[in-house]
Structures are given as C-alpha cells and as structure tokens.
Amino acid sequence: MSNSLPAPIEELLSSLLKRNTKTNGSPGLEPSELASVREWMAEVVSSVLALEAHCEWLENAFGAKLRFTRSRWDEGALEDDVLQPNPAFPHRERLDRETALDVAEVGVGAIADDELPQLLLNPYALRDLADLIHFTLPDIWLDRLGQAGRKLRDRQVLSA
Amino acid sequence: MNGEGWSGHFRAWVERTRPVAWEFLNYRLRGFPLFAAELTTVMDRALESAIRVAEDRQRFIWHSPEYSSFLKWFLQESWRCGLRELFTLDVVVREVERLPEVERSLTHWLYVDQFPDYQLSALLRKHPRETVTREDVRRRALQNYRVLCHVIRGDGWGYDDDHMTFPQPPILIGLTQR
C-alpha cells in the first residue's frame, strides 16, 4: 500500500536530511519544530499507514532498502537468524530497551528533545517502537490505534 | 456489574474495539507476500469470527466485566481467528497440499486449532508407552514450520531481507524470550 507523507512533514524531513549531512549525523531541531515532530512521531509508531509512508520516504532519501529484522518484542524460534540493519541508513540503532518501554508507557514525551531528530531519520528504531506498541497494546496508545484503524479502513474501502 | 453480565454493553464495545482491531490485525498480518492481496478479506473474516466467539462468551457473565479486559481479549481473539482464516485462502490451501502428508494435519493443529503443548503431546503420541515432552512438541512444531516455509519459498525458510515467509504458529512465539 503506497501512500505519501503530509507536505509539512515532508518539508521537515527534507530539511532535517540536509542538516544531517551538514552536521555529520547530528542534526538538531528548532524549538518551534518540537511539538509537530512529537505529534508526527506518535502517529508513525501507532499507524501502519504513517509508518509505511515515513519508511518509504527514508528509503528514497537514503537510496537504501529497509531490511526485514525480527522484532525483539515478539521473539520466537527464529531468533538465531536475526538479520542486520542495512548500513546505508546512517541512523539504525534501536532505542535502548528502557527508553522504548517508557515510550510505550507514557508516550513520545519520554524521548529527549536531542534524540528526536536522529530518531526521525531512523527507520529501524521507529519500526521497533511501532512493534512494541502494536504487540503490547499499552492503554495510553489505544485511542491512537483506533484512529489509525479508522483511517486504514477508510482507505481500504476507497481502494476496494 | 449486575446479574445480566456485560451483554448490555456488547454491541457498543464491539464497535468501539473494531478500529483498534483493524490496525492491530493489519500490523500483524501485513508484509507476507503469499496472502498480501487477500489481507482485507482475512481481516474481515477474522473480525467476524472474533465477534461470533465474543457473542458466545456473553453466556459467561464474568468473562469480560470491564471494557478494558474485553478489548484486550478481543484483540487476541481476532489474531487467533486471523491465523485460522489464513487456512481457508486458496493460496494457502495450495501450499498445504504440497506439504508431505504427515505434516498437513499438524499444520492445522498448530494454526487452526492452536492446541497447547499438552494436547499436541497427546496427538503426537503414537503409542501409550511413548513420552512426548513439551520440548519434543516444540521441536516438532518448529520442524513443521520450517517445512511449510520451504514449500512456500522453494529455498531457505523463515525470512529473508525483505519479509517473513509466513506467520509463526503461536506455540513457537515467545520461546526464546530473554
């Protein structure tokens, strides 16, 4: 299912990508950008549509393919075969386990301001958070999951 | 809650839960090329099956006295139903037909019946003196999953750079939790 990012997010990501290059991988955000970044990040980790759009954008931006990796939140018999993230993505480490669990429990406010820009450019960490939220279904995320489900359903009905 | 149980809330709870279940099921079932074209069908059928199971559970008045417990139960039930519904799809039935005969029933016991260890142990035991331990059952389930993936992919198993081949049977999930 191909979909596109909201225009303001696409602009923000394009700008962030330039800053990432200029700063050798340590881009910053303007204080005025923080609220919209947190809002979008919450949508990305709670919505299949937003996550796919964001990751597709990153794949195009970095000219790299996002490899499948097993989720650490849904571990199973295949653990020994875990594939490595694609090194073409400059940011590819997952958040540490405790911070990720904090996000699940209290929301994206648990992420420090200075971690946000790299996280926005890191498809593996975003997908990891989305896995955590979709597999463990924390109470504070249920409304967002419902909103995401309604959008998804509308889209599938329209495309049927 | 009074003596009539949670029936009075049932329809409202189902409607409130449906969008969450839609996102949850889509997240869990997306990314499998074998049935990607039929994902919406699987999800529709899974939700309808889960609703039928929920309707049945209304007979048990303390099953889901609060919405929060109903919601979490319903999502897990819809996932269980989703795995089961996969095996009604022609694309999956065709792959099961290609399995060695000895594997076909076990595949259904793992995905359709989703039997726990002790019942699989009883099903796999060939004679009364044979001991089939929990580890034996899981080893056998893993072997079955590998064979199924081999049949679907033609080479390798489990997953490659792009995707997983097929959802794992529930009995294998969580085996290696750290």
Image (cartoon, coloured by chain):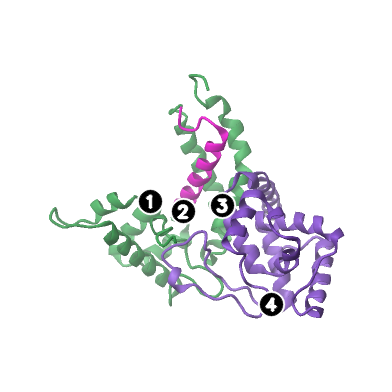
Which residues, given as a range, are shown in magenta?
Answer: B62-85
Disc 4 vs disc 2: Cβ atoms closer than 8 Å?
A: no
Residue B89 horizontal/vertical position (percent): 47, 56
Question: What is the distance, in whole Å, between disc 2 and disc 1 at their CAs?
Answer: 9 Å
Indicate yes or no whether the magenta region holds residue B67: yes
- Mark nearer the viewer, 1 or 4: 4
Element marked by disc 3: helix
Question: What is the distance, in whole Å, between disc 3 and disc 1 at their CAs?
Answer: 17 Å
Residue annotated with mark 1 = B114
Which residue appears at 49% of the width and 51% of the height? B82
Which residue appears at 63% of the width and 66% of the height? A125
Amino acid type shown at disc 3: Leu
In which chain is the residue bearing label 1? Answer: B
Question: What is the distance, in whole Å, between disc 4 and disc 3 at their CAs?
Answer: 31 Å
Question: Of the numbered discs in the image, which one, if any, rests on residue A92?
Answer: none
Q: Which chain is green?
A: B
Question: Of the numbered discs in the image, which one, if any, rests on residue A90?
Answer: 4
Residue B32 horizontal/vertical position (percent): 53, 64
Disc 2 vs disc 1: Cβ atoms closer than 8 Å?
A: yes
Drawn side of residue B35 relative to residue A100, left or right:
left
In which chain is the residue bearing label 3? Answer: B
- Asked if residue B26 shows in the view, the reply is no
